[in-house]
């Protein structure tokens, strides 16, 4: 089950989308999300959805992986559909007992479910095609202006990098500690809730002790390598916008235009 | 040879009354390969941390290329001259890819991006990890991680590398990789190497061995002179390489000619020579 | 009588995925009751996977593991009980310490066995003595101890379960020469006093040569050798080919042999090698 969730995972590749400037990718993902909510009828939503779908084709990421990015959330999507189907008034298609399904209801549920699906595809595409480190870097640079109002942008980004670096190490460590305690007869699979929580103590305490030790040693190692905070720091990898980023924004602008045109031409579905 | 690091009457204690180092006087010269030996608690790890200003002496002075390590204004300079590699390979890699980690120190120093790229590639080639530059650190072996840590230090072009038990957590293959890398740097780039270790065979490969005991220097000489003092070393919880011990035993019980051998090849040659002579 | 019997043991990590990895391939072996067995093999040879099968932490993909003559994966067998019969001390075991006092930490295993307070007390004290922990340390917090003492406390925590088989993975890693010798000698003493089976996994050929009776060599997930120490080190060429090192003194003898001296290379202890060389000097000297 857990391994079915692909959201947030990076899939290395060399496509145009992979090579785009991560800052542009973040901005476009945000912009796209806004446009998705501006679109107020089904044609407009479909028009907006073309943008991540075209990007998905160019990213060379397989169809299956894309589908899996929203599959775990299908129950949630279904719930939204049902809710809108029964509660939106208008011209009935089917009507029996207390249940009334209307054209408008059908329209609104279609919009809602497509919005969620497109949003998940867009978000996943960002993480599929951008390594966590580039993502962190791009966020740091995009948030740069916030430094002026004393937001510790560099520190936040550094913390994110270190967290990303140490997650695999700590997972491995947890497994090791669990095995060591199991070897002393610790029982983690049985008992009621209280017993199970208590069984976690022999794992959590060593994990915290070791995490603090690691933090200490890491701080020394960073200091030894001349780290004194964000002041005066440069970066090896310079982020540069290139032609492909220009083309991507052009595509986005076209889709914005299409959405607005559809909105005007077909009118909002939310008037009931 | 020019003196690079000089300790003058250095004392250190973590808490009052518990002296770890006691009026230490010692010098390290440019281009030397020095091994520091001592049992756990002898103060050798503290000594290492004093050399780049992570710790400040409680009394006395540590001078790196003439700069006292107590000068907060010049700490960056000191740390660029004296690079440090620690014991646990997992706890000194900061970034999520090998090359980003190697770049870390240079980024902190504000070096230009193209220059960082050039020096990172060169450093990674030197430790033979260039092919792994895009790898995440947790997918590497212990020996590879330590070589990445070394690359991160030599990218700064330091004049000295201090390694605090860099091989303690490695398997024999990893140990060999690290020691070979360090020796190579010393030989080809003239980098001063200060290797804190408790592996006698590693110390035997150095130019000079410093033996620490009870917060002071017990012996400071060539490996041959130091390992000749087998009884003294054993009395302070240390040892000599097995071949050295074997040969000294043969001297004592079999009338072999007195000599200090440092590795199996030397040992076998000396024995062969004696047997032929009869 | 064997303490542990393994038949056709295969273990595959992440089967049915692209990351599939055969860690053990059809391994069969018998470990004798009361023996001191050394286990060697380079990192990734399968030795860690193997020892985790002995106490049921890993389940075989195929094949059987018998402890004390019983199949530990047969229906109705309580897998937790095998952890008490086969005590496993992992590499750097000090990270497993978690209790408020050393005493309580050592008592964790015996407590999980459901023993009485008096029984637990006698086992904790016995284990502390075997590992050379002074009684006054027992009431301290384990986090206040020195590195070497922490290691001892962690080993005591496994010994206190009085396992029939004690497995030690790289027990001396990171210790200085004195600490190394002390702890290994204590294990040797534990072995001769309790008569239990001891398995020592180590990268140090010196330690293996000095303490074990038989040696098991793992290579690429298969059992390469299981024999007496002298017979294993006599197959020097094969060992070197698999990336393993030889005891330093064996290297000395081998170099002498290459130079044409009639030397018996099966000696591996300090005393035997010295005797062999003295004999050689006497013989060729005549």
Image (cartoon, coloured by chain):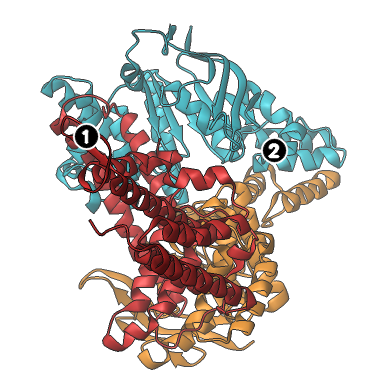
Chain colours: A red, B orange, C cyan
The percent coordinates of residue B119 (x first, y second) are 64, 78
Residue at 32% from the left image edge and 46% from the top image edge: A103
From this view, report whether residue C224 is shown above or below residue B51. Answer: above
Q: Could you tell me which quadrant the N terminus of chain A lies in?
A: top left
Chain identity of mark 1: A
Position of residue C231 in the picture relative to residue A227 (left or right): right
Per the model, the C-alpha gap separating discs 2 and 1 is 49 Å
Residue B46 drawn above or below residue A211: below
Question: In this view of the protein, can residue B215 be seen by the observer?
Answer: no
Query: Who is closer to the viewer here, C209 or B14?
Result: B14
Label 1 residue SS? helix
Q: Is residue A88 left or right of residue A222?
A: left
Packing grade of label 2 (10 A; few <14, some 14-19, many >=20) is many
> Disc 2 sits on a residue from what chain?
C
Q: Percent from the top left, x then y, of residue A54? A: 57, 59
Q: Within 10 Å of the Cα at label 1, are there few (<14), some (14-19), or many (20+) other Cα atoms?
A: some
Q: Is residue B163 something that shows in the picture?
A: yes
Query: Which is more toward the observer, A235 or C157?
Result: A235
Instruction: Please tell me in which quadrant of the rendered image residue B260 appears.
Output: bottom right
Mark 2 against mark 1, which lies toward the viewer? 1
In the picture of the structure, the residue carrying the numbered disc 1 is A199
- Where's residue C127, x and y in %? 27, 30
Q: Is residue A207 above or below residue A139?
A: above
Q: Is the residue A209 above or below the residue C92 in the image?
A: below
* Residue drawn at the location 14% of the way across and 43% of the way down: C139
Quadrant position of residue A272: bottom left
Element marked by disc 2: helix
Whether residues under marks 2 and 1 lie with C-beta atoms below 8 angstroms apart, the answer is no
Residue at the spot 44% in from the left edge and 72% down from the top edge: A27
Q: Which residue is mark 2?
A: C250
Are tags 2 and 1 found on a single chain? Answer: no
């Amino acid at each position: 089950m857990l391994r079915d969730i692909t959201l947030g995972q990076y899939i290395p590749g060399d496509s145009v989308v992979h090579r785009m400037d991560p800052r542009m990718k973040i901005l476009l993902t945000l912009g796209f999300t806004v446009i998705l909510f501006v679109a107020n009828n089904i044609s407009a939503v479909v028009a907006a959805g073309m943008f991540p779908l075209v990007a998905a084709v160019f990213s060379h990421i397989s169809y299956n992986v894309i589908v899996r990015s929203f599959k775990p959330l299908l129950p949630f999507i279904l719930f939204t559909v049902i809710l809108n189907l029964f509660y939106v008034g208008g011209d009935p298609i089917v009507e029996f007992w207390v249940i009334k399904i209307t054209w408008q209801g059908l329209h609104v549920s279609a919009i809602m479910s497509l919005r969620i699906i497109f949003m998940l595809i867009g978000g996943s595409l960002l993480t599929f095609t951008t390594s966590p480190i580039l993502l962190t870097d791009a966020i740091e640079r995009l948030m740069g202006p916030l430094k002026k109002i004393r937001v510790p942008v560099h520190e936040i980004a550094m913390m994110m990098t270190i967290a990303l670096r140490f997650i695999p190490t700590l997972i491995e460590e947890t497994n090791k500690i669990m095995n060591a305690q199991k070897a002393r007869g610790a029982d983690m699979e049985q008992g009621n809730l209280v017993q199970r929580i208590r069984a976690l103590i022999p794992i959590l305490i060593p994990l915290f002790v070791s995490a603090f030790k690691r933090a200490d040693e890491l701080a020394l190692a960073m200091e030894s390598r001349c780290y004194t905070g964000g002041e005066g720091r440069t970066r090896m990898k310079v982020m540069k916008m290139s032609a492909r980023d220009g083309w991507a924004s052009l595509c986005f602008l076209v889709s914005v235009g299409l959405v607005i045109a559809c909105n005007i031409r077909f009118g909002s579905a939310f008037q009931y | 040879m020019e003196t690079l690091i000089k300790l003058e009457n250095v004392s250190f204690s973590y808490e009052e009354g518990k002296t770890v180092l006691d009026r230490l006087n010692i010098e390290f010269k440019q281009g030397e390969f020095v091994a520091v030996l001592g049992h756990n608690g002898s103060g050798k790890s503290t000594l290492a941390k004093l050399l780049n200003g992570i710790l400040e002496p409680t009394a006395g002075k540590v001078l790196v290329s003439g700069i006292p390590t107590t000068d907060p204004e010049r700490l960056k300079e000191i740390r660029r001259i004296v690079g440090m590699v620690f014991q646990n390979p997992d706890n000194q890699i900061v970034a999520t890819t090998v090359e980003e980690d190697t770049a870390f120190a240079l980024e902190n120093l504000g070096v230009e991006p193209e220059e960082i790229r050039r020096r990172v590639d060169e450093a990674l080639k030197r430790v033979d990890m260039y092919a792994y530059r895009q790898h995440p650190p947790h997918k590497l072996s212990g020996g590879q991680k330590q070589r990445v840590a070394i690359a991160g230090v030599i990218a700064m072009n330091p004049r000295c590398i201090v390694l605090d038990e860099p091989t303690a957590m490695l398997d024999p293959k990893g140990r060999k990789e690290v020691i070979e890398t360090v020796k190579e740097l010393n030989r080809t780039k003239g980098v001063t190497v200060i290797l804190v270790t408790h592996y006698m065979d590693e110390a035997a490969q150095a130019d000079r061995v410093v033996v620490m005991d009870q917060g002071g220097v017990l012996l400071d000489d060539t490996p041959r002179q130091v390992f000749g003092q087998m009884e003294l070393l054993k009395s302070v919880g240390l040892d000599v390489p097995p071949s050295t011990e074997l040969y000294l035993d043969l001297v004592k019980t079999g009338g072999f000619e007195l000599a200090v051998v440092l590795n199996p090849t030397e040992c076998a040659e000396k024995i062969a020579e004696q047997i032929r002579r009869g | 009588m064997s303490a542990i019997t393994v038949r056709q043991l295969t273990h595959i990590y992440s089967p049915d995925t692209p990351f599939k990895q055969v860690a053990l391939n059809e391994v069969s072996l018998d470990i004798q009751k009361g023996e001191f067995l050394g286990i060697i093999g380079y990192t990734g040879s399968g030795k860690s996977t193997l020892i985790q099968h002995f106490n049921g932490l890993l389940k075989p993909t195929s094949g059987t593991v018998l402890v004390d003559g019983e199949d530990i994966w047969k229906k109705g067998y309580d897998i937790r009980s095998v952890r008490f019969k086969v005590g496993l001390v992992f590499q750097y075991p000090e990270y497993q310490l978690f209790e408020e006092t050393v005493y309580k930490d050592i008592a964790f295993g015996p407590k999980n066995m459901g023993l009485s307070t008096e029984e637990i007390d006698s086992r904790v004290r016995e284990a502390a003595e075997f590992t050379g922990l002074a009684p006054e340390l027992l009431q301290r917090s384990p986090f206040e101890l020195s590195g070497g003492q922490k290691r001892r406390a962690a080993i005591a925590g496994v010994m206190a379960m009085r396992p029939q088989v004690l497995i030690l993975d790289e027990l001396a890693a990171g210790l200085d020469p004195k600490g190394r010798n002390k702890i290994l000698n204590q294990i040797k003493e534990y072995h001769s006093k309790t008569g239990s089976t001891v398995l020592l996994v180590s990268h140090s050929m010196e330690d293996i040569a000095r303490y074990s009776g038989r040696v098991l060599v793992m290579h690429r997930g298969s059992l390469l050798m299981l024999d007496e120490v002298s017979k294993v080190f006599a197959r020097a060429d094969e060992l070197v080919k698999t990336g393993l090192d030889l005891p330093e003194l064996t290297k000395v003898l081998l170099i002498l042999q290459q130079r044409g001296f009639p030397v018996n290379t099966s000696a591996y202890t300090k005393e035997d090698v010295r005797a062999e060389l003295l004999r050689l000097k006497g013989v060729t000297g005549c």
